[in-house]
Image: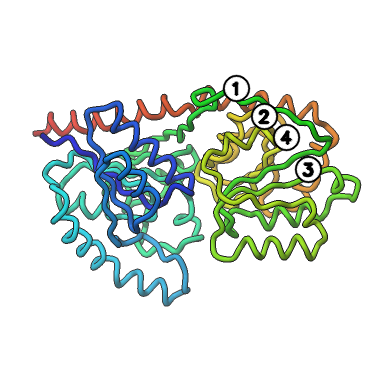
Amino acid sequence: MKNKILFIVEADLKSGSGKCAWELIKLTKERTEFIPVVITQYHNDLNDTCSALCIENHSTHYARTCSLGMGWLGWGIAFCCRPFLNYFSFIKLRKRINFNSICIIHSNSSSIDFGAYLHKKLHIPHVWHIREFLVFNHFWTPIIRNLPQYITQNSNQVITVSNKLNEFLQENAKKTNVQTLYDGVYTPNEKKEINKSNTSNKLRLVCVGNLAPIKGQDFLLEAVCLLPLDILNDISIDFYGANIGNFEQKLKTFARENSIEHIVSFKGFCNDIYDVLPNYDIAIQPSHSEGFSRVTAEYMFAGLCVIAAKEGAIPELIQDRENGFLYEDYNKEELADLLRYCFYNKNITECCAKKAKEKALLNYNFEKNFKKIIDIYDNILLQRELIC
């Protein structure tokens, strides 16, 4: 009986997309008759977590839909290697996986197309889950011409995590097999009740995300430098996230050179962010590219007031001056003004935080998200049976 779902995951558990994929994989195993099989590009903590729960998993160096660096040289290498990487990955996995037992392939990112390769080669239904703009807005350079059309043509169903992504794909591919399904996040109530308490007079700011230029932590520090001294003496900023390259050192150097190192702290990666969010008043999302922003939803669930860049899908989560505050991306003066406003208007920020939590509970609950994805699987298999 074909009852296995092949999950092809691009990220590890230190990223939002990797966490979302893992939660889907875990509940698929626990609550459905489907059996998950996981493929990653490199062995990472997701493989180890799968193994701990006896979930079949493999790693293989499949191809990407984009070039991650090295300019035109990197693009040329990625372009030339792509068909060979997918082919040899298939040959390798064919010895380990019984592809006849796979009923659905689920790809977790627009940056990988191994799922599309297997879909075309084996005629297995394919769900392509698009979580980011990075390939589409050229932060990563696509090596596939008209990638949106390629995605829709090589999928039975495309899932986008925001209406912004949905509109972009449909506009550029002119297909109807695209559905918006917001990422679901485990709510604090499903783990433990969050009790916020502030024993300090300082305004406590938190910024969660892997430390990397695309995430905008450097831009946040630049905005903080514009604040007057009386505010700088009464705020603190903590960063949580894995260090990418040497970016953390660059941030520390900037803080030291601008005499704000006494208010800035780098806490490293935190496995359970709900353990620490109660310690803060304001959450910052300075990322320059977000297809959904899981961390923003986590801020909202935790009852924090969010200040975020008016970029990508963020305005679908945060409505300016209603349940948070938005600024134009790369406008550090506007961000500094919002930090100043929140410092002097704590009653308004508390009201925004309350409304943000209400919206998160209504729209971003993981249980609702999971059920909708399983419904997609069932509908694809039903349509396949009717055709056969």
Q: Name the residue under label 3.
A: 339
Q: Residues within 10 Å of mark 3 (few under 14, many from 20)?
A: many
| Residue 358 numbered mark, or none | 1
Specify whether residue 235 is in view.
yes
Q: Which amino acid does label 2 sit on?
A: Asn
Type of residue at label 4?
Asp
Position of residue 339 measured from the top left corner of the image (x, y, whole percent)? 78, 43
Choose top left, top right, bottom left or bottom right for residue 368.
Answer: top left
Q: Is residue 353 left or right of residue 16?
A: right
Taking the view exactly as shown, the residue that stands out farthest to the front is 52
Tell me where residue 174 sits by quadrant: top left
Q: Residue furthest left?
A: 388
- For label 1, the crowd category at 10 Å Cα-Cα, with few meaning under 14, some 14 to 19 and many 20 or more, is some
Measured in 3D between alpha carbons, the distance from the residue under mark 3 to the one under mark 4, in whole angstroms, is 12 Å
The local crowd at label 2, few if under 14, some if 14 to 19, many if 20 or more residues have their Cα within 10 Å, is many
Whichever of labels 2 and 3 marks the residue nearer the N terminus, that label is: 2
Q: Is residue 87 above or below residue 49?
A: below
Which percent across, then down, holds residue 76?
37, 74
